[in-house]
Amino acid sequence: MATEEAFFAGKPVEWGLYEALKRELVWRYPEMEVRVAKTQVSFFDRLMFGCVSSTRVRRKAEMPAHFLTLTLGLPEPVDSPRIAVKCEPYPGRWTHHIVLSSPDEIDAELLAWIDRAHQFAQR
């Protein structure tokens, strides 16, 4: 099974960003489980409520040099310039992709979206 360190091997900036995000998540959801797959690191608290990947969700020229894409499922669309892409894969579930390039972006607004995704996943 892959480890978080192996997932971010050779990407020290992304690793630091991931560690900052994970610290916040562990503080909020102490029972959280992390599962590492080939293309993403997923966050579970009984059910998956989010994941990070290195998936480019905008044109290459529009992406920062170092980033993580945070993906959250929410019951309604969020209108914000911070949301790179959103879609409704099925009624009542909106997938949101958010590009993170700095620990400063792990702010109250983002954490509120994560809390909402966590609550939504528990239903």
Image (cartoon, rainbow, N blue to C red):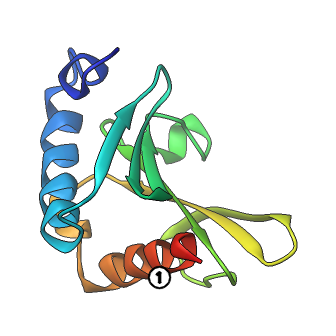
Q: Which residue is mark 1?
A: 116
Give above or below for 42 relative to 83: above
Mark 1 crowd level (few <14, some 14–19, many ≥20, 10 Å Cα): some
Left or right of 76 on screen, residue 58: left
The x, y position of residue 105, in whole percent, is 26, 68
Taking the spot 40% from the left edge, 53% from the top edge, the residue there is: 44
Q: Quadrant of the N terminus?
A: top left
Near-viewer residue (41 or 110): 41
Secondary structure, mark 1, is helix
Taking the spot 50% from the left edge, 73% from the top edge, the residue there is: 117
Name the quadrant containing residue 115.
bottom left
Name the quadrant containing residue 109.
bottom left
Give above or below for 47 relative to 107: above
Taking the spot 56% from the left edge, 77% from the top edge, the residue there is: 120
Give above or below for 51 relative to 105: above
Near-viewer residue (80 or 7): 7
The x, y position of residue 31, in whole percent, is 23, 60
The x, y position of residue 95, in whole percent, is 66, 63
